[in-house]
């Protein structure tokens, strides 16, 4: 089984660790039934066997149980992979073999109660039931299965071999046959348990890979969306996104029966900035000028880069008087703008054209009116505001 090819993303160590993990989980849930079983032993065997024998057995069983419980808690606390690295799986096998041995001893004690008769048959019955149940509990740990059954049946073997062969041979033969059946059944159970673990690990791996590729896809989608809607230099909306937004705004304006204003802003003599200080500085100035403009706006206002050094602003629910105030705020803020990383002597001003935008007017026409106002502002000497008409 262990030589079978494992699916992608699942290593043999992962499988072993998960098997140990499940074995530990199963073992830890058996505590209550084990304690109940011991109580039963005390009640049933107490009156028939010497107290020291019953007491000794209970102590022995408690010691084995304590060992196994401590071990499973530790495995669950530090994780199965670390537990394997610390060799706790070998200790688990050891504990299981001790546990099998105690069950074997119990069977021997039961068989020796004189008034119950049928000594060996009773013993065999208890052993077969115990070993079959143990296979189910230890199905994930192949060596654990062998260890438990080894401990369990070694007691029976010792007993039968100590009797004359002439009387014990039928039991020895049936024991040998049962061992073979047990072996085959155990192998099958172990293979099934391991298959289930591999399938779970593969699913876990696939789910993680899927989550990963989903995250990558989402990231690519976000990037594509940003590329499609934002100007890469200033990170404000591009032309296309502005027009889309303006059409949405027009619908809202119609519903609410309000008017907006459009501002077209153009930095003055920007060519000179590039020529004097270089294109890289020009880019930096553009970014910072854009940030200064943005700082003068409300959340609901829309800012877009309309061309090289030209920006378009949409102020929803704003009449011309309000638009003029905003434009003046922007103009003075740019005029006063000084950034530590700008070269000395760099002065920045902007001209702004304003046009009213009633809902009934197509946005393209309102933009062209703002453009006309801007043209007039430029013509009148720049660093000023003009309102259309
Ligand atoms: N650094 C940089 N410069 C840009 C960018 N886009 C446009 N420009 C420059 O902006 C300048 C615009 O120059 P013009 O259209 O002549 O206008 P201007 O010099 O600003 O003069 P007026 O608008 O008439 O005041 C050109 O030199 C463009 O190269 C950009 O993304 N980065």
Image (cartoon, rainbow, N blue to C red):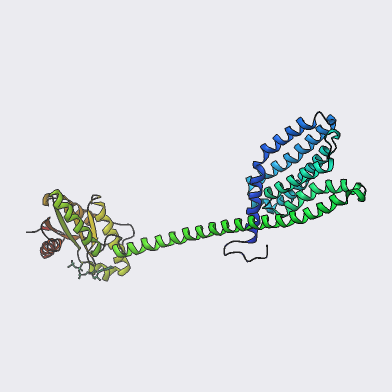
Looking at the image, residue 389 sits to the left or right of residue 114; the answer is: left
Look at the picture and state if 247 lies above or below 70. Answer: below
Looking at the image, residue 132 sits to the left or right of residue 322; the answer is: right
* Residue visible at 47% across and 60% down in the picture: 210
Instruction: Give how far across and how far down residue 131 sits, in percent.
Output: 74, 47
Residue projecting furthest to the top:
47
Residue projecting furthest to the bottom:
275
Please state, as top left, top right, bottom left or bottom right, where the C terminus lies in the image: bottom left
Looking at this view, is 304 or 165 the one in front?
Answer: 165
Q: Is any part of residue 285 visible from this angle?
A: no
Instruction: Give how far across and how far down residue 246 sits, in percent.
Output: 19, 58
Residue projecting furthest to the left:
389
Q: Quadrant of residue 49?
A: top right
Q: Quadrant of residue 37?
A: top right
Looking at the image, residue 321 sits to the left or right of residue 54; the answer is: left
* Residue visible at 16% across and 57% down in the picture: 262
Q: Quadrant of residue 179?
A: bottom right
Please state, as top left, top right, bottom left or bottom right, where the N terminus lies in the image: bottom right
Looking at this view, is 142 or 8 the one in front?
Answer: 142
Instruction: Give how far across and how far down residue 132 sits, in percent.
Output: 72, 48
Instruction: Give how far across and how far down residue 332 sits, in percent.
Output: 20, 54
Look at the picture and state if 267 lies above or below 151. Answer: below
Q: Quadrant of ligand 1?
A: bottom left
């Amino acid at each position: 089984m262990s030589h079978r090819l494992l699916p992608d993303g699942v290593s043999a160590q992962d499988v072993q660790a998960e098997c140990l993990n499940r074995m530990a989980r199963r073992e830890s849930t058996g505590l209550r039934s084990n304690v109940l079983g011991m109580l039963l032993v005390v009640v049933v065997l107490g009156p028939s066997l010497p107290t020291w024998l019953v007491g000794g057995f209970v102590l022995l069983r408690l010691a084995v149980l304590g060992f196994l419980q401590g071990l499973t808690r530790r495995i669950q606390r530090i994780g199965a992979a670390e537990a394997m690295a610390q060799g706790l799986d070998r200790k688990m096998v050891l504990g299981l073999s001790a546990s099998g041995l105690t069950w074997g001893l119990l069977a021997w004690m039961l068989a020796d109660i004189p008034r119950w008769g049928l000594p060996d048959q009773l013993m065999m019955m208890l052993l077969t039931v115990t070993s079959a149940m143990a296979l189910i509990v230890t199905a994930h740990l192949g060596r654990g299965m062998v260890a438990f059954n080894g401990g369990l049946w070694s007691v029976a073997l010792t007993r039968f071999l100590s009797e004359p062969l002439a009387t014990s041979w039928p039991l020895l033969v049936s024991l040998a046959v049962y061992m073979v059946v047990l072996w085959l059944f155990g192998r099958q159970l172990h293979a099934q348990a391991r298959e289930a673990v591999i399938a779970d690990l593969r699913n876990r791996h696939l789910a993680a890979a899927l989550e990963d590729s989903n995250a990558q896809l989402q990231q690519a989608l976000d990037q594509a969306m940003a590329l499609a809607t934002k100007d890469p230099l200033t990170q404000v909306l591009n032309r296309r996104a502005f027009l889309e937004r303006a059409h949405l705004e027009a619908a809202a304006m119609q519903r609410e029966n309000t008017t907006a204003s459009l501002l077209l802003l153009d930095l003055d003599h920007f060519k000179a900035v590039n020529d004097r200080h270089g294109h890289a500085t020009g880019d930096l100035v553009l970014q910072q000028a854009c940030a200064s403009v943005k700082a003068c706006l409300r959340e609901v206002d829309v800012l877009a880069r309309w061309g090289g050094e030209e920006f378009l602003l949409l102020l929803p629910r704003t009449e011309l008087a309000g638009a003029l105030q905003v434009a003046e705020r922007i103009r003075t803020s740019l005029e006063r703008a000084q950034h530590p990383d700008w070269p000395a002597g760099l002065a920045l001003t902007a001209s702004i054209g304003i046009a009213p935008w009633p809902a009934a007017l197509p946005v393209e026409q309102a933009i062209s009116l703002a453009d006309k106002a801007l043209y007039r502002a430029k013509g009148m000497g720049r660093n000023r505001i003009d309102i259309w008409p």
